Image (cartoon, rainbow, N blue to C red):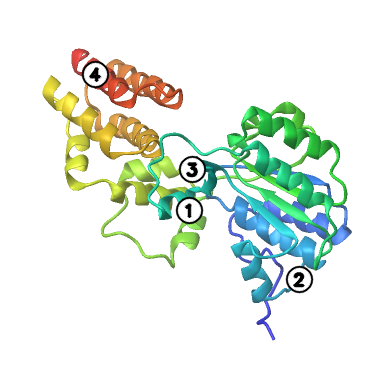
């Protein structure tokens, strides 16, 4: 027999008492909406809470459970749960971020939730469940819906059938109003320092304390702190040295621009812009008005890269502009 899970299904969700209380009440009264939207920062427990909620929906009970079923849900192997994430398109195949990293894919753009993925969700929710109480789907990264996929999702929400759909997004502003109006919204919040420590306490830490820029970027999200640690550690030592020192000459600026554009993929470059903005605020390089101008330049660079401007040229213009302002 499978080992039992003690307490409620939400026992390992930390720092999200209000969301858990709302979901637990819905489960206990069996007043479930056909679609839920979990809104909050990345890495604060939205996905874990969604999986625990769906575990209770599929099993029909809030208390207890078993580890084998929980493992199947977390691995996406339960026959009545479909988990969908943003994907990259490569040689006619759709790859999640983890699959793309595993295959060493050079990521030229950002992942998307695509039309064919959303259509799969609609078909899945319309089918009869095989083991659980109903068919369920978890759609992660709703902010990455392209236009065609958003229209298809709206159609699914208008005709939900007997299934249950949970959407994850960073905030309400990332979701179309027509989709938002058809979902029961559950809000998640950043964690306090004590809750952060509780979540991260059992995990291996890098040598030394986290750089202040990483803590600021995490903004109360344990998952984001782990992500930022990984991004920072992925930079090579010479890249870190170039980044941490103020640029002095046009040659340094052009060298750094080439280095970033050739050695970092688009997601890493976008992450680096956020890190650099925090670094400028904390480093105090120049007058406050000059720092503000440079941070706005980096924000413009962020928009340009997301708009598929040629990365090396965009970095060169931004870095040389920063030198000229000194």
- Which residue corresponds to the image point at 85% horizontal and 58% vertical from the top-left? 128
Q: Could you tell me how far apart the alpha carbons at marks 2 and 3 are, in whole angstroms?
A: 45 Å
Determine whether, in the image, residue 201 is placed left or right of residue 159.
Answer: left
Query: Which residue is labeled 4 in the image?
Result: 322
Q: Between marks 4 and 2, how big is the CA–CA gap? A: 58 Å
> Which numbered disc, 2 or 1, marks the residue that appears first in the sequence?
2
Between the residue at mark 4 and the residue at mark 3, the CA separation in whole angstroms equals 39 Å
Q: Which mark is residue 91?
A: 3
Regarding residue 94, the answer to whether it shows in the image is yes
Residue located beneath label 1 in the image: 99
Q: SS of the residue at dot 2?
A: loop
For marks 1 and 4, the one nearer the N-term is: 1
Vertical position of residue 236 compared to residue 175: above or below: below
Which circle's residue, 4 or 3, is located before the other in the chain? 3
Q: Percent from the top left, x then y, of residue 262?
A: 26, 35
Q: On the rendered image, what quadrant is the N terminus found in?
A: bottom right
Q: What separation in Å lies between label 1 and label 4 (alpha carbons)?
A: 37 Å
Instruction: Say which element carries label 3.
Output: loop
Are the residues flagged by discs 3 and 1 in contact, CB closer than 8 Å? no
Q: Position of residue 3 (x, y in %)?
A: 65, 82
The percent position of residue 220, horizontal first and vertical second, equals: 48, 46
Q: Which mark is residue 63?
A: 2
Of marks 2 and 1, the one in the foreground: 1
**Image height of 193 relative to 216, above or below:** below
- Residue 59 vs residue 104, the one in the foreground: 104
* Residue 62 place in picture, x, y as percent: 77, 66
Q: Which residue sits at x=14%, y=27%?
A: 252
Say which mark, if any, is on residue 29. Answer: none
Residues under numbered marks 2 and 1 in contact, where contact means CB atoms less than 8 Å apart: no
What residue do we see at 74% from left, 34% from top?
Answer: 152
């Amino acid at each position: 027999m499978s080992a039992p899970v003690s307490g409620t299904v939400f026992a390992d969700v930390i720092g999200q008492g209000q969301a858990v209380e709302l979901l637990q009440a819905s489960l206990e009264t069996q007043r479930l909406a056909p679609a839920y939207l979990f809104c909050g920062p990345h890495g604060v427990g939205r996905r874990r809470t969604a999986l625990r909620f769906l575990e209770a929906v599929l099993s029909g009970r809030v208390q207890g459970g078993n580890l084998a079923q929980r493992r199947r849900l977390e691995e996406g192997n339960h026959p009545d749960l479909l988990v969908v994430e943003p994907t990259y398109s490569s040689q006619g195949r759709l790859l999640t971020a983890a699959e793309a990293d595993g295959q060493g894919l050079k990521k030229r753009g950002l992942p998307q939730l695509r039309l064919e993925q959303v259509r799969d969700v609609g078909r899945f929710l319309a089918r009869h469940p095989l083991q659980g109480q109903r068919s369920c789907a978890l759609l992660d990264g709703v902010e990455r819906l392209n236009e065609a996929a958003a229209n298809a999702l709206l159609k699914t929400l208008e005709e939900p059938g007997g299934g249950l759909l949970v959407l994850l997004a960073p905030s309400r502003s990332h979701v179309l109003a027509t989709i938002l109006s058809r979902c029961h919204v559950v809000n998640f919040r950043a964690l306090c320092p004590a809750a952060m420590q509780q979540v991260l306490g059992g995990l291996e830490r890098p040598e030394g304390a986290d750089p202040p820029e990483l803590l600021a970027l995490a903004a109360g999200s344990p998952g984001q702190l782990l992500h930022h640690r990984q991004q920072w550690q992925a930079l090579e030592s010479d890249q870190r040295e170039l980044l941490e020192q103020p640029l002095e000459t046009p040659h340094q600026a052009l060298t750094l621009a080439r280095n970033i554009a050739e050695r970092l993929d688009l997601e890493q470059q976008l992450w680096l812009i956020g890190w650099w903005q925090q670094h400028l605020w904390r480093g105090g390089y120049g007058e406050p008005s000059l720092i503000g101008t440079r941070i706005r330049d980096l924000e413009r660079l962020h928009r340009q890269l997301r708009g598929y401007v040629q990365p090396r040229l965009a970095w060169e213009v931004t870095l040389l502009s920063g030198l000229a302002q000194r």
